[in-house]
Structures are given as C-alpha cells and as structure tokens.
Image: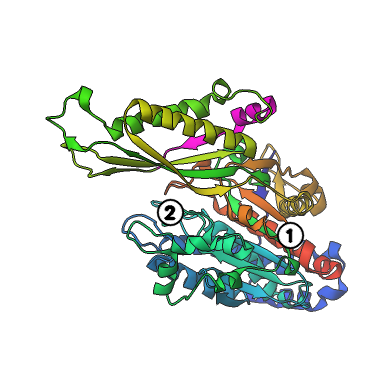
Amino acid sequence: MAYAYLQCQLPSPLSFLLSALFLLLLPFSSSADAGFSGINCLHPEILKDEAVARLVELGKVSDAEGYLERVFQSPASVRAGNLIRTWMEDAGLKTWVDRMGNVHGRSEGLNPSEKALLIGSHLDTVVDAGIFDGALGIITALSALKVLNINGMLEKLKRPVEVIAFSDEEGVRFQSTFLGSAAVAGVLPVSVLHVHDKSGVTVQGALRKNSIEISEENLLEVKYDPETVWGYIEVHMEQGPVLETLGLPLGVVKGIAGQTRLKVTVKGQQGHAGTVPMKMRRDPMAAAAELMVVLENLCKQPEDYLAYDGQCLESTVQSLSGSLVCTVGEIWTWPSASNVIPGQVSFTVDIRAMDDLGREAIIYELSRKIHQVCGERSVVCLVERKHDAKAAACDPELSLKLKSAAAAAGGRWGVIDDNGKEESRAVDEVAAAVPVPVLMSGAGHDAMAMSKLTKVAMLFVRCRGGVSHSPEEHVSEDDVWAAGLAVLAFLENTTLSPHLSNNYE
C-alpha cells in the first residue's frame, strides 16, 4: 500500500467566499465537520510550493561561482540570513540577529512569560553543497508558522515559539562545529573567539567585519536561560538511505552519535625529489599515507585492536562495530610542489560513534599507533583535538509528541490501494496506519549542542539515495510538504489550546 498526499484545488472566487463563510462559522463546528475543507486548502501552496521555491532561492545564495558554498559570516551567509529574516517577518515573527550571527524569529503568543519552544537548523553549508541540508529545517518551520499566522492562530499560541537559523553548524571555516547553537546553549568556550581560519581571520574578527561586536565578556549574552525554554525540535534531511529503503517520508531520531575531530600534523625533512635517496628520506607524506591506512583498519575492525578490560567492555566494542565511522576529509602539504619532498603534511580525522567510551578508546589507540609509526619513520607527529561532542539522546516524551505529529501529518494524506484507487477513510484511521520509524543519527546536528540547554527531538526527512553534502542531495516536493505538515501538527498539539487545535483542523 502506497501513500499519496490529498491535495486541495485552488479556490475559485465563489469557493473562496464559501471558505470565508466556513471560517466564520468554524468555532461553532465540530472537529469532525472540519475535515479537509476550507483552511486546509492553503497547506499545499505554503507547505509545499512556496517552501520548495524558497529552498531553491536560498540554494542560489553562494560565495562561489558554479557551486554552493556558504560558510560562517561570509558575504553569502549574511545575505542568506537577511533573506531568512524576511521570511520570518512574512510569517509574522519578530526578528533579530544575535552576537554570534544567529538569526531569530519569535512569536510571543498569549503568554510571553511561558517557556518557549525553539525550532531550528543551520544556514551555513559545506563546500559544493546541496540545497536541503540545514535549510530544510528552517523553511519547514517558517512555513508551518506562516499557516498559523494567515489563519489567525499565531497570536493564540499558549507559549512563545521561536525559530533560529544557526550561523554555523558545519564548521567549515574555523574547524569548530556548532558555533551558533553552542553559543545559544551556553557551551561555547570563549577561546573559540580567537580561533582563526586559513586566512588568519578570527571568529571575533569575522563577526566584527559584519558589524557584530562580540567579546569574551558579552558572549554570555547569547546564552539562553534553561528556565525560559520548554524544548527544542529540529527537522533535517536524513542524510542516509534508511527511510528511502523503508519507503517512508518521515522518521523520528532516537539519538545522535558522538563526534571527535582531530588534526594530525606530520613533520619530516623537506628536500629535492630527484636527489635524496629513498632510504635516506624522512617523508611526511609517506608517513601520513600509512597513518590513514592504520585509521581505516582500526575503524573497520575495532575488535582486532581494542582489548577487553575494565575500561573497554565487550558491549562497547560490539557497539563500535555497528556505529563507528572514521574519515580523512582534508589534506594539506607544504610546500606542495611536484618536485619537492614535503616538509610537512597535515590531515583531518573525523571519528563518530554512538558509544562515547568506545570513541575515546579508538582515539587513544589511534594516537598510540600514530606515534609508533612516526617513530619508526623518524618524523615528528602532533595530534590536536579540534572538536568534541558527546552522543546526545533525544528526549523520549518530546520524541513521542513529534512521532505523533508525523503520524497526524500522515492522517492528512489519502491512501491509495494497489490498483491506484483512492479509498475513503477517516483522518484518524489513516494516521493510525502510517508508520513512523525510529532512527539513530550518525551525523552531527545542532540538536547535539541544544541538548545541553533543554530537551530535544528530531524529525528526519527522506532523501534520494541517502546522498548529502553534495549537489546531488535531493528531497522530493511531497516529502518537503510532509515535513511541513508534521511541524504544523506538532505546533497544533503542543502550542494551541485543545479547543483551538480541534477547530483549526
């Protein structure tokens, strides 16, 4: 059995008047009478058509010609933030930019003193990126809030709702991820302000270039008080193949793998490529190549390298066998000439696992192997930890609410039988039949940092082939719509009073 979305036709002038009359009478109607008529005809136009158009528009905001690249506080990043800010205002939100460059849009609702629901994702990208990573979560949230605003429900929210477009999650420019969300969560070290990029510009300097003054003293102004936050949810493309394999558009995340980023520097003896005998070389490139193979073997077969003892239990090693992934993503050489033996080689190592203790065991073993290989090759090695994030568990109660919202979104779809004929079924019956799988995330997300501030939940959206961090990444228009419907259902269930939510449906 396949699921297809139940779409409304664009209203004629007469049907528009009838819909207006319907809205006037809506408070006196039962929820069962509301069904798919009237107000729901706006959903495809906003949650699908406009949302997709905005994803495409935002995907054109780039610092590079011919591919998408938008890093922390770059000119394109600032333009993207301004564009998102206009969309926030279009949804009826009050907007501002904080001292870490995060873009905020907030509705206070009926009770500004109540704890707020935060919804967010990131506006930065990797190099040669696709248009959905990060942007999908921002735009689906704004689309859902726009639906509420158009229909007069935004001002009736029982708690404040705030959308945050985080300035940096990928960590491309400064090799330090979650700059935006970590600042909001209050876990960003002040020392990060003085980290510099490849051009020597610091985080503080990049912000100052865009007229944002930040110092070690006022960094804490970005931090939210945990007592003012009810929870955080994030919609994100899955970046993996599970949902596509299952044939389902949405899934709820159980937890996010912990992550460590290392920078390994190997220093040898620079020399002429044609005059230094092979046996007399102290070649850092050859040493680095061996170290990369060591890393690959360690991460493919951790059980062959880690000993079972009081610190590394058998269950930890078994967990690593199912979740551990390691990647060398960047390599730099100096002086980087074809006829010169390099004097120095540096490369990054990205290590991820669901088990934090197991991840530390891998890092320890890798460091031991690095120094062993470097000693044998008479080169000097330095291992720097550039980023650490512990595995984050999503809140069970909040995740259940998000899962119910995803199912409720499914309840707004028609069901097509195997012969392609639409069945007539009640929304609740369809919702009960829509499975919403529970997944683990191997990718890092802003929810990891936000889990230090409040309870978090995440919704994954199906992507084609599991491809991400690539211009080939793709989320179908209908799946964008499904995500928007799920956020809308979540908002209805958690921020509207029951009688308003029922009538709205």
Residue density around tag 2, few if under 14, some if 14–19, many if 20 or more, within 10 Å = some
- Colour scheme in use: rainbow
Q: Which mark, residue 490?
A: 1
As helix, strand or loop, the secondary structure at mark 1 comes to helix
Per the image, the residue denoted by label 2 is: 172
For the residue pair 106 and 268, the one nearer the viewer reads as 268
Q: Position of residue 344 (x, y in %)?
A: 29, 41
In the image: residue 288, left or right of residue 114: left
Residue density around tag 1, few if under 14, some if 14–19, many if 20 or more, within 10 Å = many
**Three-letter amino acid code at the position of disc 1:** Phe
Quadrant where the N terminus is found in the figure: top right
The magenta region covers 313-329
Q: Is residue 355 visible?
A: no
Q: Is residue 326 magenta?
A: yes
Q: Position of residue 228 (x, y in %)?
A: 73, 69
Name the quadrant containing residue 439.
top right
**Three-letter amino acid code at the position of disc 2:** Val
Q: How many marks?
A: 2
Q: Position of residue 504 (x, y in %)?
A: 78, 68
Q: CA distance from mark 2 to mark 1?
A: 32 Å
